[in-house]
Image (tube, rainbow, N blue to C red):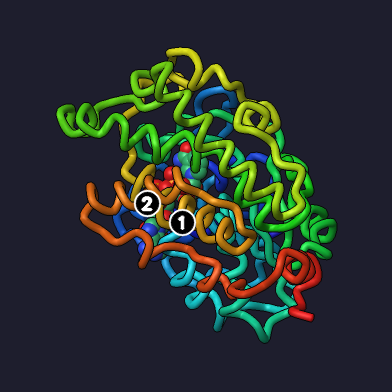
C-alpha cells in the first residue's frame, strides 16, 4: 500500500511512523523547508510513549505531486488549513484515491464541496487522530495511543468501503455520519472552556501551564460537564446516540482520570498549545453552536465561550468559524440533514 501524510506537525510525524512500522510505503508532505531538512537529517521518525516504533527511512516531500499513485492520503493539518489543502490536492487527485482527515471537525464536508465533481474520491474523517502526540526532538514524537477511532465517510453510505482501505493498525470504528464523528471530538470540551477559566495563569506563565494537570480543578471540571451536556443535546437532536465526555475517553482507550485527577497524560511535562483556543473555538465550538441552531437546541455555554474567546484573543471567531452555512448545511431540517450526510444528496 502507498500512502501520503499531509502535514509535518506532531500528528503527521506520528502517523507517518505508525504507517511505516506497518510496512506501508509512506511519504510525508510538509510545506516547511525546516521540517523537511530536520526529518531528512534524522532519516527516520521515532515514537516514544506507550508505543515504540520506528519505521524505515522516511521520505519527505514539499509539493502535492507526491500524492501521485497514493492509495490513501492522510490529512493531518490544523482545521484552518483544510480549505487550502483541498485546493492544493484538487489538481492531483487520481480516481479511486481515499482521503482521510485525522481529526476532521466536519472538514470532509468542505473537501466534498471543493471536490463536488469528484465522487470517485473516497472521503472521510476521524474524531481524533490515532494518538496524542508531541514533537520532543528532531524526528522524535512522544505519543499516547488510541485504541478505537470513531470514523465515517462522506457520504456515510461509503464508510465500510473507507474502513477497508485503511491498515488494521489504525483502529477505525464506524460512526453514523461525519457530524457524529466531529461532535465526538473530546478536545471541544476539555480545551476551550478550561483555557478561558485559566487564562490569567496561562498569561502569567507565558503558556508554561499543563492544562490537563494544573488547569483542572473541581469547579472547572463541573463547568466542563455542563458544557458537555450541550454537545450531547445537539448530537441527540441529530438522532445520534451521543456519548458523554467520560464515555468518549473510554471509547478511544483513554480514561476520564486525565482531567478528573492530576497528572500528565502524555507522560511528559506539557504546556499550552494555542490551538486549544484558536482552532477548537472557531472550528469546534462554532460548529456545536451553529449545528445547535439548525436543530433548535440552545447552546448558551458555547455561545459564551465563542464571545469571550473572541474578546480575549482579539479575533471574531464567529466570523472565522465553521458554521452550518460554510458546510453547505444551512436550512436543512434534521431529516434532510441526515439524508445528506448518509447519502450525499439534498433530496
Ligand atoms: N497533537 C495532538 O496530540 C492532537 C490531539 C488531538 C487532535 N489533534 C489535531 O490534529 C491536527 C494536527 O495536530 P498537530 O499537533 O500535528 O498540529 P500542528 O503541529 O500545530 O500542525 C500540524 C500541521 O498543520 C499544518 N497547518 C497549520 N495551519 C495550516 C494552514 N493554515 N494551512 C495549511 N496547513 C496548515 C502545518 O503543516 P505543514 O507541515 O505543511 O506546515 C502543520 O505542520 C490538529 O487539527 C489538532 O487539533 C492533535
Q: Residue 20, can we see it?
A: no
Q: Quadrant of residue 233?
A: top right
Marks 2 and 1 in Cβ contact (< 8 Å): yes
> In this picture, is 46 found above or below 182?
above
Residue 287 seen by the camera: yes
Q: Identify the mark nearer the N-term, 2 or 1.
A: 1
Classify 10 Å Cα crowding around label 1: few (below 14), some (14-19), many (20 and above): many
Of residues 217 and 3, which is closer to you in this image? 217
Q: Position of residue 132 (x, y in %)?
A: 51, 35
Q: Secondary structure at mark 2?
A: helix
Between 238 and 207, the one nearer to me in the picture: 238
Residue 316 position, x and y percent, is 29, 61
Q: Secondary structure at mark 1?
A: helix
Up-down relation of residue 62 to residue 137 (above or below): below
Count of marks overlaid on the render = 2
Which residue is denoted by mark 2 in the rendering? 306
Instruction: Determine the image quadrant of residue 270.
Output: top left
Q: Residue sitting at 57 percent across and 45 percent down?
A: 15
Which residue is under mark 1?
286
Q: Residue at x 71, y 74 (%)?
A: 121
Alpha-carbon distance for marks 2 and 1? 7 Å
Picture coordinates of residue 211 (x, y %)? 36, 27
The quadrant of the picture occupied by the C terminus is bottom right
Q: Is residue 71 shown left or right of residue 296?
A: right
Direction top: furthest residue = 262
Amino acid at each position: 500500500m502507498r500512502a501520503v501524510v499531509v502535514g509535518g506537525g506532531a500528528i503527521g510525524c506520528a502517523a507517518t511512523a505508525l504507517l511505516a512500522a506497518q510496512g506501508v510505503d509512506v511519504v510525508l508532505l510538509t510545506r516547511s523547508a525546516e521540517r523537511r531538512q530536520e526529518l531528512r537529517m534524522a532519516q527516520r521518525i521515532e515514537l516514544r510513549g506507550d508505543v515504540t516504533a520506528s519505521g524505515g527511512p522516511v521520505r519527505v516531500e514539499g509539493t502535492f505531486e507526491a500524492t501521485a499513485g497514493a492509495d490513501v492520503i492522510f490529512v493531518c493539518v490544523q482545521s484552518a488549513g483544510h480549505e487550502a489543502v483541498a485546493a492544493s490536492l484538487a489538481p492531483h487527485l487520481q480516481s479511486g484515491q481515499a482521503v482521510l482527515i485525522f481529526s476532521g471537525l466536519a472538514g470532509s464536508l468542505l473537501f466534498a464541496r471543493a471536490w463536488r465533481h469528484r465522487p470517485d474520491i473516497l472521503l472521510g474523517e476521524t474524531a481524533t487522530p490515532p494518538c496524542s502526540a508531541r514533537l520532543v526532538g528532531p524526528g522524535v514524537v512522544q505519543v499516547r495511543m488510541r485504541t478505537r477511532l470513531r470514523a465515517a465517510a462522506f457520504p456515510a453510505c461509503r464508510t465500510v468501503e473507507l474502513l477497508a482501505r485503511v491498515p488494521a493498525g489504525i483502529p477505525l470504528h464506524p460512526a453514523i455520519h461525519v457530524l457524529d464523528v466531529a461532535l465526538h471530538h473530546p478536545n471541544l470540551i476539555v480545551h476551550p472552556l478550561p483555557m478561558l477559566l485559566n487564562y490569567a495563569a496561562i498569561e502569567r506563565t507565558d503558556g508554561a501551564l499543563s492544562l490537563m494537570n494544573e488547569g483542572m480543578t473541581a469547579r472547572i471540571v463541573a463547568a466542563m460537564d455542563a458544557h458537555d451536556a450541550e454537545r450531547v443535546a445537539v448530537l441527540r437532536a441529530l438522532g445520534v446516540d451521543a456519548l458523554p465526555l467520560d464515555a468518549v475517553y473510554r471509547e478511544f482507550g483513554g480514561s476520564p482520570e486525565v482531567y478528573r485527577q492530576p497528572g500528565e497524560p502524555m507522560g511528559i511535562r506539557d504546556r499550552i498549545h494555542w490551538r486549544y483556543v484558536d482552532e477548537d473555538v472557531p472550528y469546534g465550538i462554532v460548529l456545536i453552536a451553529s449545528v445547535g441552531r439548525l436543530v433548535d437546541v440552545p447552546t448558551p455555554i458555547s455561545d459564551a465561550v465563542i464571545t469571550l474567546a473572541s474578546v480575549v484573543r482579539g479575533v471574531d471567531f464567529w466570523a472565522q468559524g465553521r458554521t452550518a452555512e460554510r458546510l453547505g448545511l444551512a436550512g436543512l431540517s434534521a431529516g434532510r440533514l441526515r439524508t445528506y450526510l448518509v447519502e450525499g444528496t439534498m433530496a
